[in-house]
Image: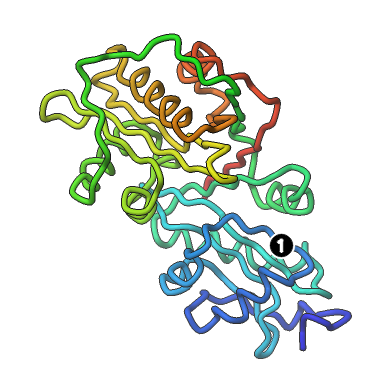
Amino acid sequence: MWLFRKSVDISRATPRRISSNDLSATSRLLRDGARRYYGLLGGDLPALLAANHGLVLEVGSDLVAVVLVNWPTHATCWLRGAAFAEGVETRAAAALLMPALHRTLASHDIHTVYYAGEEAADAWLIPILQTHGYASDTAVVVYEKTTLDLPTIGNLHVRIRPATKADLAGVVQLDQRCFEPQWTKNDLVLGPAIEQGPYFMVAELGPELVGYAFATTHFGGRLVHLVRIAVDPARRSEQIGVRLLAEVITYASAQQANVITLNTQAYNTRAQRLYRWFGFVATGEHQPILRCTL
């Protein structure tokens, strides 16, 4: 079996589009490969393979390397997985996979690919990506709040209620108005979050959907992670984001959480001012974001 071979002759390798037939081999490679990067949610892999969102490298009938991207949004996508089998010279394999991946993406009118990883865990991958045109774009920084006090509760005219399936289309449209293409979330992410997530609230002014907040809970509710606050750009400066954040903190208090965490882009100084006002403190952790323009 190739996972235990001492070396792989990359000169015999051929890249091709991934498919559903590769699920077993891809899962095994992402689990047991010598070099691995995995940035997917648990149930994403079968759907990505069915949609051919990636490439594999084959030697004969053996799959020895794989690279995966997520669903494109407005001509952008994210690198979400990469794995190389034991005995594969990683740089040589990447020299076959990455240009082929970029050509495939460009042929489907995708012009930008992003990568978010961990400097320590993915130290092997970042230099390889840089060789293939990936450069620093920004960083995601981490904030936390360990006291659940509130400096204010925001706009009292805003109605906050739980999101329902009927809100999905409006939430997706709002998200696209609020964020740059690479940061938007589509219905494949927001739909399950609305239906299954522990906390997904929308904000309304009259009949108008003007914002939403999405949070997850961890460690039996002791940690609440604020995944997203979105406010219609036309309604900013009306303390809608303030109200949504206050509601999240109130929810965390009801869960008897010890800490609330959130991530935001280093350049999003407007949001960071709001978080610091509410008592969030930067932890010093950051996640590098790389970008490749095809």
Picture coordinates of residue 110, whole percent (x, y): 43, 53
Query: Would you place residue 122 above or below residue 210 in this image?
Result: below
> Which of the image's four quarters has the N terminus?
bottom right
Q: Nearest the camera: 106 or 282?
A: 282
- Name which quarter of the figure residue 156 lies in: top left
What residue sits right under mark 1 in the picture? 36
Where is 177 relative to 107, above or below? above
Query: Could you say which is closer to the camera, residue 94 or residue 182?
Result: 182
Q: Position of residue 244 (x, y in %)?
A: 35, 25
Q: Is residue 20 left or right of residue 86?
A: left
Residue 207 appears anywhere in the view: yes
Image coordinates for residue 84, horizontal then vertical, percent: 73, 69
Give the residue type that dot 1 points to: Arg
Say how many tags the image has: 1
The residue that appears at 45% across and 25% down in the rendered structure is 249
Q: Quadrant of residue 135?
A: top right
Q: Is residue 245 above or below residue 52?
A: above
- Which structural element holds mark 1? strand
Label 1 environment density (alpha carbons within 10 Å; few <14, some 14–19, many ≥20): many
Residue depicted at 48% across the width and 64% down the height: 44
Q: Residue furthest right?
A: 6
Quarter of image, res 3: bottom right
126 is higher (above) or lower (below) than 135? below
Q: How is the image coloured?
A: rainbow
Whole-percent x and y of residue 46?
47, 72
**Furthest residue in direction left, as rendered:** 207
Which residue is nearer to you in this view: 185 or 7?
Answer: 185
Instruction: Describe residue 190's horizontal placement relative to residue 7 as left or right.
Output: left
Going 70% across and 44% down the picture, which residue do you hit? Answer: 118
Tell me which residue sits at (58%, 81%) in the image: 24
Nearer to the camera, 93 or 116: 116
